Image (cartoon, rainbow, N blue to C red):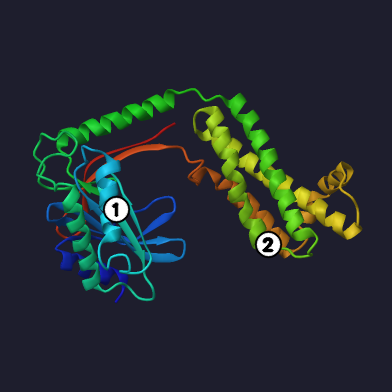
Amino acid sequence: MNLVTYMSQLGQRLGCIYVPKCTAFKTESRQNVKGAVFGVRRGYLLALACTQIGRNRGLSLLVRHPKSTAGAQTAGVQIKEALKNRPGFSSFFGKKNINATEDSVLITWSFSVTKTKLDDVVNVVDAAVEEVSKYAPAFAGKCEDCGVAEANEFILMNGLPGYHCSSCQMRIAAEKQREADEYRARDANYVVGLAVGLMAAAAAGSVWGWLIGLMEADSGKWSPKLHAFMAILVSLPICWLMFKAMGKRDRVGQALAVVLTLAAKWWGDAIYFTHVDMHVGHQAFSWQLVADVLRHFFDYKLYDGWHKFVTAADVLLSFAVPWMPWAAVPKFEQLFQTINPDGTLTQTMAQMTDAL
């Protein structure tokens, strides 16, 4: 059974609707695979999807309830502990992760070899809803934002099910627009940001160069895949510190991040090549040796096919930095959609502003 058929049948078993084109569970580290199933069970909102974290694929179940007046430290913690202590639940499906907040509980478990049986999924959904019902009330047909207006049909807000009246949708969209305008009007301190970025690049590149030099130079081994991937990790501290000093993420800052990432990676490579020369020539470290390496830097970087591959990866990954989570320009988005009986989506209101 392919995944689309599996999710479709799962939706039918739960009395829910399968929406093939939805990324309700997508995050920076987790991918949403082949849509999600949405519905209501005993007054609680459900979202269920196949998700993937790295190479591990499994199912994620979200059960939403009205926000607890006592806060996440009471209802959320109680629900999480109740699920952990539920007889048979701790070993059900093997390894899983449970997270609870003031208005939801998220349960994620991995497939072992094959997909979890449909009956087992239904059982865990019912178990989760039963435990949630002990500590949090079900939705009562009111907008969860204002608590006054009638809201009997749930909609998706940025992919997650909820009850939001038309007035609150307009208000939320207006608030996001105001946040975007305020962020856009904020001045970025490029001088301080560049200074901090330069120091971060020098430090990150030096750490990379010395560590990989100590790991590989004396052993005579070389891992091109590790060298090719490292630009991503080098960019993280550079972007985090530089944008924090700038006070804003924008296109100029992203351009600086690209240049600084590539410079940091290649500065680390120069230190690494220096260690290699030290090992081959039985020499002690000196800045003169570093200078010699820098003069012939591209002779090292383009030495053979694998070195050319790493060099190309350095450039490509550096130019990809603006799309990485720690360097992306923030977007203030509120997308409201209704689910049609056939699983398609109809947009009711959208507000997505790139904060530039």
- Taking the image as shown, residue 63 lies to the left or right of residue 257, namely left
Question: Residue at left 67%, top 34%?
Answer: 199
Local packing at callout 2 (Cα closer than 10 Å; few below 14, some 14-19, many 20+) is few
Residue 23 location (% of width, % of height): 32, 54
Q: In the rendered structure, which disc, 2 or 1, sits on the residue that comes first in sequence?
A: 1
Question: Residue at left 84%, top 45%?
Answer: 290
Residue 169 location (% of width, % of height): 21, 36
Q: Which is more foreground, mark 2 or mark 1?
A: 1
Mark pair 2, 1: CA separation: 44 Å
- Taking the image as shown, residue 7 lies to the left or right of residue 228, namely left
Residue 4 location (% of width, % of height): 28, 68
Question: Residue at left 78%, top 64%?
Answer: 219
Relative vertical location of residue 238 with respect to residue 181 in this rendering, above or below:
below
Residue bearing mark 1: 80
Residue flagged by tag 1: what amino acid is it? Lys
- Taking the image as shown, residue 212 lies to the left or right of residue 189, namely right
Look at the numbered disc 2 and give the secondary structure of its residue: helix
Look at the numbered disc 1 and give the secondary structure of its residue: helix
* Residue 339 visible: no
Q: Nearer the viewer, residue 259 or 264?
A: 264
- Taking the image as shown, residue 205 lies to the left or right of residue 218, namely left
- Which circle marks residue 224 in the picture? 2
* Residue 256 visible: yes
Relative vertical location of residue 106 with respect to residue 50 in this rendering, above or below:
above
Residue flagged by tag 2: what amino acid is it? Pro
Q: Quadrant of the C terminus?
A: top left
Relative vertical location of residue 86 with respect to residue 68 in this rendering, above or below:
below
